[in-house]
Amino acid sequence: MADNSQWQEISEKGLWSNNPALVQLLGLCPLLAVSGSVVNALGLGFATMLVLLCSNIAVSLIRKTVSDAVRLPAFVMIIASLTTCIELLMQAFTYELYTILGIFIPLIVTNCAILGRADAFASKNPVLPAAWDGFMMGLGFTLVLVTLGAIREVLGSGTLFANMHLLFGDAARGWTLTLFANYPGFLVAILPPGAFIITGFLIALKNVVDKNLEARAAAKKEKPAKGSKRVRTTGKIA
């Protein structure tokens, strides 16, 4: 059983220090393609997170019964089966959003972040840590997707949370926030080049935050303890 420090380490890696989108730079194809709005980002993020969570659990359960020779094909079969289940569920309950996301839902099978976590972590750890790793990695990926979707939607359309009823039903029809009246729109922000530029800014922002945190930690480490006295030595000790 993992202790508290191990749970915290898994959480910190998934959300920040080893984030699939900002650090590993995996799964960028769907991230850049469908993050034009918050609802699209949430739809793809939830689907990816669910596949990641379930695949980590399944891989951890069979890790002692599958040989190394067929390890990767078995993992791909598990991921493909789970992706098909998610695809069918979206067709049944969120069909309009499913048609908008299009080919990028089946392409979850090829998301390197999912296969990477299955092979690097779930195949070597018990079920609970593997499930937690899948959840936190999926959550970190979803948070980046939603942040990118929100920025692109605001810059591109001047709105926020538009068409949320596609994911949450009729109760969400009134969630749209119009931030700029008569906004002409900024087409580049909605197109893939805008997604590349904004993702670059997000990665740069994360690097700046990391450097500031490292500098503060180093300064705190070098700061003399309170109440200590400095000893000045002059001359040469014989």
Image (cartoon, rainbow, N blue to C red):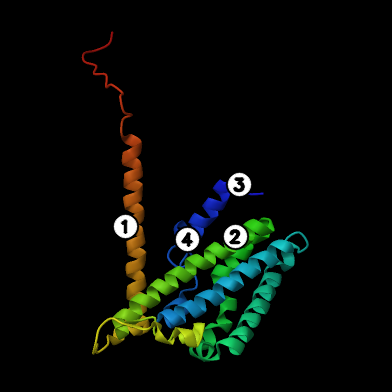
Closest to the observer, 179 or 71:
179
Give the spatial CA distance, label 2 vs label 3.
13 Å
The residue at the point 37 percent across, 84 percent down is: 176
Callout 2 crowding tier (Cα within 10 Å): few <14, some 14–19, many ≥20? some
Element type at mark 4: helix
The residue at the point 70 percent across, 67 percent down is: 58
Tell me the kind of residue under disc 1.
Val
- Percent from the top left, x then y, of residue 78? 68, 73
Name the image quarter holding residue 111: bottom right
Closest to the observer, 182 or 230:
182
Tell me the kind of residue under disc 3.
Asp
- Percent from the top left, x then y, of residue 106? 58, 83
Element type at mark 1: helix
The residue at the point 55 percent across, 74 percent down is: 48
Q: Residue beneath label 3, please? A: 3
Tell me the kind of residue under disc 2.
Trp
Above-or-below relation of 238 to 170: above
Element type at mark 2: helix
Q: Residue beneath label 1, please? A: 208
Q: Is residue 111 something one can see in this rendering?
A: no
Q: Residue beneath label 2, please? A: 132
Q: Earlier in the sequence, mark 4 or mark 2?
A: 4
